Image (cartoon, helix red, strand yellow):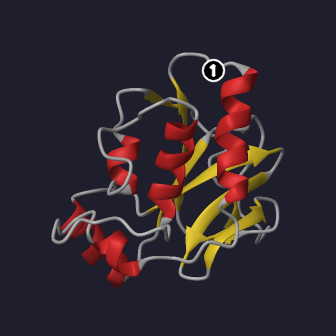
């Protein structure tokens, strides 16, 4: 297990992860993507994401991953006000329940009427939309891979991408 190196991660940055398991390979095949999870940085070492447990705030220094991690940020520099609106939206979502059906609809477009519930990439896309930034045409039903390929984002290399804790 490895922690994500938080050096240089800034509020508004989007972190994407990809696990190597069998279920994850199946999901990647259906979504035609490399990444499966998106989370948004809201402060030094802190991020918000949505999992089956719902929307939660976590500390990157306390969360271990057995997967790859990628960091993206807006190509055009965002103002402090814009970052505040992104972060405030994400924080306001804490406690919102997770939507499995809506998450599935990102790759199987059937009955696409969004619910008030969240899933990882929807939280991120809606946070940016709340600040007036549309990283994708459809913030309601976008996959983490869709976000990763947004023309408004650029990858920022993570120094020592993942460092091992088994030293």
> In front here: 59 or 102?
102
Point 53% across, 66% down: residue: 67
Quarter occupied by the N terminus: bottom right
Q: Nearer the viewer, residue 137 or 149?
A: 137
The quarter of the picture where residue 93 lies is bottom right
Eyeballing the image, is 64 above or below 150?
below
Left or right for 111, reference 71: left
Residue 64, visible in the rendered structure? yes
Image quarter in which the C terminus is found = bottom right
Q: Give left or right: position of 95 versus 62.
A: left
* Residue under the point 73% across and 38% down: 11
Instruction: Out of 146 and 132, give the one closest to the viewer.
Output: 132
Q: Which residue is mark 1?
A: 78
Residue 133, horizontal then vertical, whole percent: 48, 30
From this view, report whether residue 148 is shown above or below residue 33.
above
Helix, strand or loop under label 1: loop
Residue at the location (64% across, 54% down)?
162
Residue 14 is left or right of residue 125, and the answer is: right
Q: Is residue 25 above or below residue 14?
A: below
Query: Where does residue 40 sit, x and y in percent of width and height?
Result: 62, 49
């Amino acid at each position: 297990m490895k922690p994500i190196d938080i050096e240089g991660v800034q509020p508004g940055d989007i972190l994407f992860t990809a696990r190597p398991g069998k279920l994850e390979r199946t999901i990647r095949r259906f979504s035609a993507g490399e990444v499966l999870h998106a989370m948004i940085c809201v402060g030094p070492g802190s991020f918000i994401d949505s999992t089956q447990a719902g929307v939660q705030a976590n500390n990157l220094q306390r969360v271990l991953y057995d997967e790859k991690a990628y960091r993206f940020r807006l190509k055009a520099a965002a103002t402090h006000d814009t970052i505040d609106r992104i972060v405030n939206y994400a924080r306001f979502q804490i406690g919102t329940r997770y939507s499995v059906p809506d998450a599935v609809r990102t790759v199987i477009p059937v009955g696409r009427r969004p619910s008030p519930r969240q899933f990882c990439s929807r939280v991120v896309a809606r946070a940016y939309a709340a600040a007036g930034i549309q990283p994708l045409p459809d913030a309601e039903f976008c996959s983490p891979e869709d976000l990763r390929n947004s023309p408004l984002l650029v990858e920022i290399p993570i120094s020592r991408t993942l460092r091992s804790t088994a030293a």
